[in-house]
């Protein structure tokens, strides 16, 4: 008997996703409805969907980050094995469940800045080098 949806069985369709911040204690909310009141925090998130995350703390500028969902090395390997052993049906289950994907970046590490720090960073020109300058 074949093993359908090998990646779905071995990796699951969700994963732990961690948010850390400096300073700690920031609130976190995601575009797909997850929240935590104070970093660091960990969610159990579906592997298949990208989402937007907002990290905010009183006295600091809120940050928004995009979290992507893409095929991981382990997920691709499980999918390849599934296609060889489990066939097209198992491969289709893995593809639609998101089991072969990973959320990136994970963990998300955020450094929050005060409005004054944000303004100072905006005024500081980026370091540039030109070829030929000595």
Image: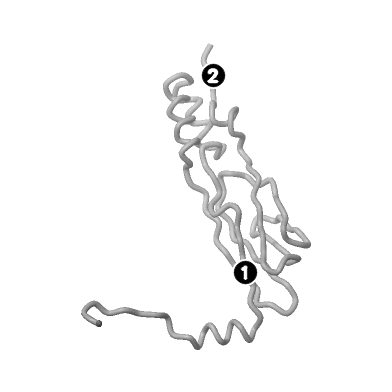
Point 64% across, 72% down: residue: 112
Q: Which residue is mark 2?
A: 3
**Image position, residue 47 (x, y; %):** 58, 44
Q: Is residue 61 above or below residue 80?
A: below
Whichever of labels 1 and 2 marks the residue nearer the N terminus, that label is 2
Point 70% across, 69% down: residue: 23
Which is more toward the observer, 58 or 40?
40
Quarter of image, res 46: top right
Determine which of the numbered discs, if any, sits on residue 82 in the image: none
User: Few, some or many C-alpha atoms within 10 Å of disc 1 (few <14, some 14-19, many ≥20)?
Assistant: few
User: Few, some or many C-alpha atoms within 10 Å of disc 2 (few <14, some 14-19, many ≥20)?
Assistant: some
- SS category of the residue bearing label 1: strand
Q: Is residue 86 above or below residue 24?
A: above
Q: Which residue is mark 1?
A: 111
**Image position, residue 88 (x, y; %):** 44, 25
**Image position, residue 55 (x, y; %):** 67, 66
Q: Quadrant of the C terminus?
A: bottom left
Point 59% across, 33% down: residue: 11
**Image position, residue 43 (x, y; %):** 70, 50
Q: CA distance from mark 1 to mark 2?
A: 44 Å
User: Residue lying farthest right?
Assistant: 37
Which is more toward the observer, 131 or 46?
131
Quarter of image, res 97: top right
């Amino acid at each position: 008997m074949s093993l359908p949806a090998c990646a779905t069985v071995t990796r699951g369709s969700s994963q732990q996703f961690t948010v850390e911040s400096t300073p700690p204690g920031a609130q976190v909310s995601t575009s797909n409805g997850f929240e935590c009141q104070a970093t660091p925090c960990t969610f159990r998130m579906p592997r298949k969907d990208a989402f937007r995350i907002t990290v905010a703390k009183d006295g600091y500028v809120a940050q928004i980050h995009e979290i992507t969902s893409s095929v991981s090395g382990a997920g691709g390997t499980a999918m390849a094995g599934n296609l060889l052993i489990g066939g097209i049906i198992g491969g289709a289950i893995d593809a639609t469940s998101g089991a072969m994907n990973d959320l990136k970046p994970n963990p998300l590490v955020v450094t929050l800045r005060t409005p004054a720090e944000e303004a100072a960073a905006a005024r500081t020109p980026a370091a540039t080098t030109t070829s030929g300058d000595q």
